[in-house]
């Protein structure tokens, strides 16, 4: 990764790694939704998750696991949401793969049921149709 590879990409320009391996790194989210919210990214500038190599994906997920252990020790969360936005329609705002690891805490929202389904708020709660 170099500044010249994608000068407009904030992740390439300022990697600020808190944990890393040969192909990927972790940084804390600049706008965290909860204490410990971090991003796991490949070093290579790749826009979307499905464009990453198998080796990059393995490196990313190895850091997700390693960071979970670190977050457990430092922040003591009660749960996690782990997810990736792929494409503008899914809410991806920076075209460089980044997996969100979001520690969750009892009481951080009134009713967390449905978890990541909350990306479409009216679909978050399980409802029978008809």
Image (cartoon, rainbow, N blue to C red):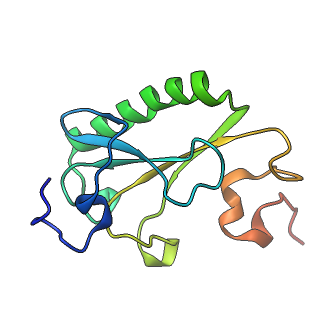
Q: Residue at x 44, y 77 (%)?
A: 88
Front position in the image: 89 or 126: 89
* Residue 46 percent coordinates (x, y): 23, 61
Q: Residue furthest bottom?
A: 89
* Residue 103 percent coordinates (x, y): 63, 40
Residue 116 vertical position relative to residue 123 in the rendered view, above or below: above
Q: Residue at x 24, y 53 (%)?
A: 52
Left or right: where does residue 90 sit relative to residue 102? left
Front position in the image: 111 or 70: 70
* Quarter of the rendering containing residue 51: bottom left
* Quarter of the rendering containing residue 64: top left
The quadrant in which the C terminus is found is bottom right
Left or right: where does residue 84 sit relative to residue 42? right
Q: Residue at x 28, y 66 (%)?
A: 47
Left or right: where does residue 102 sit relative to residue 109? left
Residue 122 vertical position relative to residue 24 in the rendered view, above or below: below
* Residue 20 percent coordinates (x, y): 29, 34
* Residue 56 percent coordinates (x, y): 24, 43
* Quarter of the rendering containing residue 40: top left
Count the labels in the image: 0
Residue 97 vertical position relative to residue 58 in the rendered view, above or below: below
Front position in the image: 61 or 29: 29
Q: Residue at x 69, y 32 (%)?
A: 77
């Amino acid at each position: 990764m170099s500044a010249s590879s994608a000068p407009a990409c904030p992740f390439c320009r300022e990697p600020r790694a808190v944990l890393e391996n040969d192909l990927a790194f972790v940084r804390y989210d600049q706008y965290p939704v909860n204490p410990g919210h971090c991003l796991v990214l490949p070093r290579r500038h790749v826009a979307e998750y499905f464009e990453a190599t198998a080796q990059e994906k393995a490196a990313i997920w190895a850091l997700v696991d390693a960071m979970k252990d670190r977050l457990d020790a430092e922040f003591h969360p009660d749960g996690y949401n782990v997810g990736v936005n792929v494409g503008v329609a899914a809410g991806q705002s920076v075209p460089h793969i980044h997996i969100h690891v979001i520690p969750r805490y009892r009481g951080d929202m009134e009713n967390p049921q449905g978890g990541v389904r909350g990306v479409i708020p009216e679909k978050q709660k399980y409802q029978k149709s008809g």
